[in-house]
Amino acid sequence: MRRAADGDAEAFAALFERFYEPLYRYFAARIPDRVEAEDMAAAVFVEVARGLPGFHSGGAAFIGWLFTVARHDLADAHRHHRRHRVDPVAEVPEPEAAPDVAEQVIGRLEAHRLRAALNRLTGDQRDVVLLKFAAGLSNEEVARALGKPVSAVKSLQHRALAALHRLLEEP
């Protein structure tokens, strides 16, 4: 991280390789448009590249900072979408790899139900679930990203999973 902050492109590339996929999964869990989720994950690294020279903490704090940037970008994107709502056109499947239409419909309905259930959680519960399961962070990393004690993260996770179970069982 120190080398990346000093302008070492290979060190920054290593950070990108390590954290891009968890960031993408975090965004993809909240944004139905795959391309937009990819763009947002990449944009976090643009912000990180700008701010990294002034970052003087260790690796654990870096993960917290990285996902704090991601959470703020996601909140900004949601505010922007509320003001400039555009209904997305469904992606057209590749002809040679087109799955069964029924499977596609079921998959989209399940993803929609899960997103709707996630949106009914409290903000903290939703953040814990997405950081833990979509981004694949440990409890300690989630705690740093949210600025909360690990015990609070565990409690939020327990309540969030119980609430998701109830919400997904609703007819």
Image (cartoon, grey):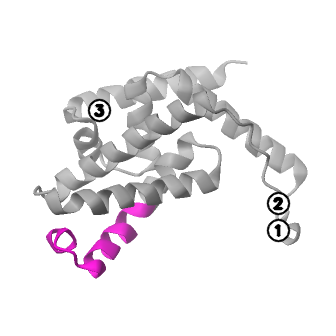
Relative to 70, is 30 on the left or the right? right
Q: Residue 153 got which mark?
A: 3
Q: Residue furthest front?
A: 84
User: How far apart are the alpha carbons under marks 3 and 1?
Assistant: 40 Å
**Amino acid type, mark 2:** Pro
Q: Residue at x 37, y 62 (%)?
A: 19
Q: Residue at x 88, y 55 (%)?
A: 100
Q: Residue furthest left?
A: 56
Q: Earlier in the sequence, mark 2 or mark 3?
A: 2
Q: Which residue is mark 2?
A: 93
Q: Quadrant of the N terminus?
A: bottom left
Q: Height in image: 110 above or below 52?
A: above
Residue 26 location in percent, x, y?
47, 47
Q: Which residues are magenta?
A: 1-20
User: How far apart are the alpha carbons under marks 2 and 1?
Assistant: 7 Å
Q: Residue 97 got which mark?
A: 1
In this rendering, the label closer to the viewer, 2 or 3: 2
User: How far apart are the alpha carbons under marks 2 and 3?
Assistant: 38 Å
Q: Earlier in the sequence, mark 3 or mark 1?
A: 1
